[in-house]
Image (cartoon, grey):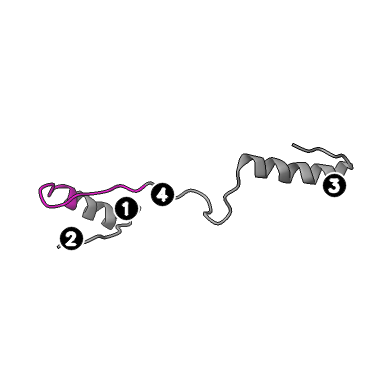
Amino acid sequence: MTVTAEIDVTRPAGMKLLRTIEQHKSVAKINYVPPQIGSTKNNFTTDDVFNMCADILNQHYGTNLTV
């Protein structure tokens, strides 16, 4: 049987638990997952951001900047 757990290592109790698990390498395997940075629902490409900025500049200055 395998058990998967999430441990909050930002707290002292979580770090202590992690160190205890790391001592038992023959029966425990630890997978480190990097934290998710930023929002996952608003992912923009550089072209999207450029077009949004160009639209704002076009409205403000009355220009016609396009890609």
Task: Report the quarter where the C terminus lies.
Answer: top right
Q: Position of residue 19 (x, y in %)?
A: 20, 49
**Measuring 32% from the left and 53% from the top, which residue is drawn there?**
9
Q: Secondary structure at mark 4?
A: loop
Closer to the N terminus: mark 3 or mark 1? 1
For marks 2 and 1, give the CA distance. Answer: 21 Å
Q: Nearer the viewer, mark 2 or mark 4?
A: 2
For marks 3 and 4, give the CA distance. Answer: 38 Å
The image shows residue 2, relative to residue 19, as above or below, that is below
Q: Which residue is mark 4?
A: 35
The image shows residue 66, relative to residue 7, as above or below, that is above
For marks 3 and 1, give the CA distance. Answer: 48 Å
Closer to the N terminus: mark 1 or mark 4? 1
Q: Which residue is mark 1?
A: 9
Q: Which residue is mark 3?
A: 59
Q: Amino acid at mark 1?
A: Val
Magenta segment includes 28: yes
Residue at the extreme right of the image, as rendered: 62
Closer to the N terminus: mark 2 or mark 1? 2
Q: Which residue is mark 2?
A: 2
Q: Nearer the viewer, mark 3 or mark 4?
A: 3
* Circle 3/circle 4 CB separation < 8 Å: no
Q: Which residues are magenta?
A: 21-33
Residue at the extreme front of the image, as rendered: 67
Q: Residues within 10 Å of mark 1 (few under 14, many from 20)?
A: few
**Measuring 19% from the left and 49% from the top, which residue is drawn there?**
29
